[in-house]
Amino acid sequence: MGAHKLLRRLSIGVFVLVGLGAAGLLAAIWMTREPAPSPLTGQRIFAASRPAVPLVQADFDVKSSIPEPTIPKAKQDQIANQLIRRPLWELATAATARAVAEAVGTSAIPIIQATNSSDV
């Protein structure tokens, strides 16, 4: 019976030592862990990225240019005819049409305008 008691005490001792070792390991892990990070702020982010800030900066140059079209003289004359001379002709015709309409009556306006538009 003595050997049985000794074996029982040894197994209990080994069990207790394994339990103490596991508890010690857990305590060591718990004590050496990193503390929980505090909330992020703009200042903390800037401080953490400070070495990278000069690397991100750049020097940009802005240049602007205005294209200058080359328009031949013939095309300039054509544009001038379309934008300047024709509206003046239409104004003169409309003034003449109004004067005639006042003298003859309002029914003459469409006839005068139809005749003048075919002349243009």
Image: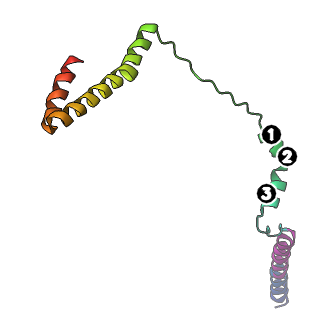
Where, quadrant-wise, is the N terminus in this rendering?
A: bottom right
Location of residue 60 (image quadrant)? top right
Type of residue at label 2?
A: Pro
Label 2: element kind: helix
The residue wearing badge 2 is: 51
- C-alpha separation, residue under disc 2 versus residue under disc 1: 8 Å
- C-alpha separation, residue under disc 2 versus residue under disc 3: 11 Å
Q: Is residue 102 above or below residue 2?
A: above
The residue wearing badge 1 is: 55
Q: What is the x, y in percent for residue 103? A: 18, 34
Callout 3: few (<14), some (14-19), or many (20+) C-alpha neighbours within 10 Å?
Answer: few
Pointers 2 and 1 in contact (C-beta within 8 Å): yes
Q: Main secondary structure of the magenta part?
A: helix
Q: Nearer the viewer, residue 74 or 12?
A: 74
Instruction: Name the residue located 80 percent from the left edge and 39 percent from the top edge.
Output: 55
Q: Is residue 115 left or right of residue 39?
A: left
Between discs 3 and 1, the one toward the N terminus: 3
Q: Which residues are magenta?
A: 16-32
Q: What is the x, y in percent for residue 99? A: 24, 32
85 is within the stretch colored magenta: no
The residue wearing badge 3 is: 45
Instruction: Name the residue located 20 percent from the left edge and 31 percent from the top edge.
Output: 100
Q: Is residue 73 left or right of residue 51?
A: left
